[in-house]
Amino acid sequence: MTYQNEKISLKDLIFITIGCSLYAFGLVTVNIANNLAEGGATGITLIIRYWLHIDPAYSIILLNIPLIWIGYRYLGKKALIYTIYGTTMLSIWTWLWQRIPIDINIHHDLFLAGVLAGLIGGTGSGLVYRFGGTTGGTDIVARIFEKKRGIVMGKTLLALDVIVLTCSLSYLDLRQMMYTLLGSYVFAQVVNFIQEGAYAARGVIIITNHPTEIANDIIQKMERGVSYLKIEGAFSGQERKALYCVVSPNELNTLKGYINHHDSEAFVSIFEVSEAMGDGFSFNAPSRSLLKYIKKGG
């Protein structure tokens, strides 16, 4: 039986291609051009480049053969195909960008180089991850940790980058390594933002003496789903209802207004939500047609 999420998507492949192109562009025109290292398996290829003078476009493929096998064991057929495709695209784009005369003139400012490398590489890798792919290397390890342990990929990649960068001291001085680490930090933040930051939502838990009135306002006026949670006070031992809902950040003030109107002493807990799925809890803004707006006297 073939599940929908196991089907190969042309859209995924297109964005993986774009992401690999961006990542390779940053690697060649910023990292290599300014003698900065890189984290992960790509950083290992730069170490090999320095000591053995082997083009990273070739060593990328060689290093990823055992890692791709591990990825297949843990991630399945679709992940294998996407990883092979992503690794191949990264190798091809790395080869191409080294042969296209593009010079980003930042006057060898290592601070700018580190930030720019993180922005470009993080954007490219973030696109690859967002559409289910990897560029091979430590990306495979990070995706396994994300799937098995729920650890965000950017955090795992940052930890692995530190290890590789420490090994990069074999050909870098401490100053260059620190600016590379800056780029790795920016890289991880951009990856996390592209994967999750674009989905900005807030979960709200409301403990109040007027749950029904507040719930009605959320449903009828905000057109958002809301659920009752049965809770028990640890001190009083009394059972009561709490409310749980998911809203967009720009709806928080409106929600707070409804809560204060009914219960100014309500306890409200607000937290970030990376994703919300299901009937009544979709983060997509509810549609408000002009006819409904007129009927409400808006």
Image: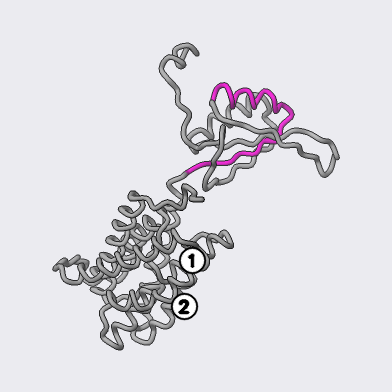
Return the mark for residue 275: none
Image spot of residue 259 (x, y percent): 63, 29
> Closest to the observer: 274 or 34?
274
Amino acid type at mark 1 = Ala
Q: Which residues are magenta?
A: 200-222
Which residue sits at x=85%, y=40%?
237
Residue under numbered circle 2? 163
Which residue sits at x=67%, y=23%?
213
Q: How is the image coloured?
A: one colour
Q: Does residue 228 lie above or below 1 as drawn?
A: above
Say whether residue 133 is left or right of residue 100. Answer: right
Which residue sits at x=81%, y=35%?
239
Residue 78: quadrant of the picture:
bottom left
Image spot of residue 136 (x, y percent): 39, 68
Residue under numbered circle 1? 142
Label 1 SS: helix
Which residue sits at x=77%, y=39%?
231
Magenta segment: does it hold 154?
no
Say whether residue 202 is left or right of residue 168. Answer: right
Say whether residue 55 is left or right of residue 247. Answer: left
